[in-house]
Amino acid sequence: MDGEVVVEELGQSANAVPVVVGRGARTARAADVVLDAVVGALAAWTVVFHLARLAGMPRDGALALWLVVLAVVALMVRDGRLGFPSVPPAGTSGSIGPVAVLASLVVAAGLAWLDIDGLWWPLAWVAVVAVLGLALRAVWKGGASRHLTDRTAMGATTGFGALAVLVLAVLAAVLSLVMVRPDQDDVFVVNRSAYVEVHSGAFPERDTIFSDEVLPVERPAVLPTAIEPLVGTLAARLPGNSAALSHLGLAPLIAALGVLATWRLLRALGMRAPVLATWAGTLFLVLDGSMHGSFGNFFAGRSWQGKAVFLMLIVPTLWHHGQALGRNGSKRHLLIGGAGILAGLGLTSSAAFIGPSVLVAAATATALDAGRPRRIGRALLASIPTLLAGFYGLIAEPQYLDDVAGGVGQVLAAIDIGRLLDSGTEPVAMVRFVFGQGPAAVVGIAAALTAWAVVRDRGARLVLLAGPAVVMGFYMAPGAFDVLDTVGSADAVVWRSMWIMPVPAMVGLVLAAPRAGIRAAQVVVPVAVLAGLLVVGTPIVSTQNRGVEMVWPPSLDLPRPEQDSARRLVEMVGSGLVAGPEDVNFAVSVLSAEVRSVNPRTSYLKGRHVGPDFLADERQALTRALDTGTLDFGDAIVGRALEGLEPDALCQRSPAPSSEVADLITIHGYDQVGSDRTCTFWMKAQ
């Protein structure tokens, strides 16, 4: 037996059958409740945040309102008005032949190795769609499934298995703490949290990196995300600061919850060894560090950022509740699926197209399997907030709305089929940006295309086919990425369409699947494949992965030792402007919203916030001079930077190759005030 057991009534009829539910099942259910509670809390905050923006509500007022909403929802759950559903049923349907699987493997190999671009892509896309159609036909011919019950599926979770997953979740959290992989997106992300932390008024609507809400914000005029203000709001009431709460609090929490979310999805899909599959899928993430946009690099190395929270927590949650909604039409699944959509909008602008794609695809797959196509409408209903977010993105910048309308008119007036087929944004390049190229890429791509073949339930097979069907059949269609770019300026994020597929779960499914006649295959295959991936791939903890460091005690995910110099600059100035090498500037902008740096990220020196008085070229020249110790851009432009920007303190990387930069700094009225192992510090003479 599995420790202490409880007896529950299966079903709600008079003929309900008592079922023994062990410790493992209760642990699984508790984990599911935690996942849904976190998603619900994020959704509630997203709504409260935008209400606060509209009403001009101060930070602490928004926090109080959010806590009241959470308390009301908690009471409703306790009183039974709402509920957290258990794992949906999984059953068995007929077997499938090898043809569709082999064809899918051929497609995976082609996407991983071949440079299919230009006018070759439409031909390749037709082949990919044909293979997906072949797989769909094979699945449908397998027949409907004979379903198990919810409680029977839950009862299959052993106490040891649940403990193994909890251990894995803890290990993931620890990895996020000891792994330092600085990411310059924090210049915007964590700086916004830091600003909210020290400003108790209304939430910021404009730039906080270079000004005190004077300049326009650096990013496009889309619906603002809510996660950064939440972190800043909590940091104002908790020990530490926003950077610490992000890197040392939110990051390990999301890394652990990501493991639990994958485990739940695997159980829901009827995986016969969900614990082993969860371990295999998570280890794949640890070894998936070859590309900056890989799933692995959003797992532990960036898990505090909203887009990583969305990928690791919200996407598997939407797959889970979407497929359950299609199976049984439950309003509870609809409610939590809708909460996932709202939570996603508070995490990343990409949720506007990824969220509904996942929820509708999952619900469609199981609704068609159950013969209840009307349930698809419920998933569409839950996706309405994304349409509102997209409309906001258009009206927030009226001139852009005019551009889109004009562009649509031009497209209707003259459709260039050749240009449409010869994609400007190459679909295969988007695949490479996430999966890479070569043997290491085969594992992820092949798993995404064949995971449907290793589960027994027809509904689950359709769910696993729905992901690649949406990505490769719709988003990767010739010209589709170009259309998205025209309508929504999505060229920088269309690669995230790969996130629609729950790749960690898919890899776990394929690696840990039983093989007929080979009893040890469930252990041997994942060990062999992951060992091979270790040899040919790049682990996320490797120094080849953007110079990752493993540290103890845990440290902020900022450049080392530059973050120490940044702290000293912040202490020297208190409130004002500083300049130094870009890594030091980066750390300053993350650590403080009251001390600003001239150039925390070079890519932010252009955009709609940049005007003649911004002195973008001067900022770049000064940063370069302080980093290299040479006047590569000439002394005149560096002098203009010192005179026009008037930074209060400077950090010149030491040792400098010559004294030319130091001499120029002295001429412009700065005194040397000390040094550390990175910088020589200068203060403006009083």
Image (cartoon, helix red, strand yellow):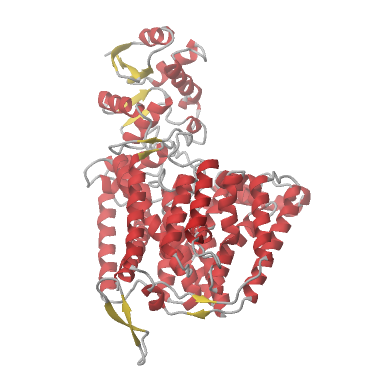
Q: Say if 556 sits above or below 167 in the image.
A: above
Q: Say if 263 sits above or below 202 in the image.
A: below
Residue visible at 33% across and 71% down in the picture: 25
Q: Residue furthest bottom?
A: 14
Residue visible at 29% across and 54% down in the picture: 62
Q: Between 166 and 264, which is closer to the camera in this rendering?
A: 166
Q: Position of residue 152 (x, y in %)?
A: 40, 78
How many numbered dots are placed on residues in this image?
A: 0
Residue 655 visible in the shown view: yes
Q: Say if 640 sits above or below 594 in the image.
A: above
Q: Say if 284 sits above or below 269 in the image.
A: above
633 sits left or right of 61 in the view: right
Q: Position of residue 287 (x, y in %)?
A: 48, 45
Q: Between 643 and 604, which is closer to the camera in this rendering?
A: 604
Residue 372 visible in the shown view: no
Which quarter of the rendered picture does the C terminus lie within? top left
Residue visible at 26% across and 77% down in the picture: 6
Q: Between 22 and 15, which is closer to the camera in this rendering?
A: 22
Q: Position of residue 507 (x, y in %)?
A: 52, 56
Q: Position of residue 342 (x, y in %)?
A: 42, 60
Residue visible at 44% across and 32% down in the picture: 547
Q: Between 89 and 531, which is closer to the camera in this rendering?
A: 531
Instruction: Kindly indicate the quadrant of the structure image that contains residue 41.
Output: bottom left
Which quarter of the rendered picture does the N terminus lie within? bottom left
473 sits left or right of 344 in the view: right
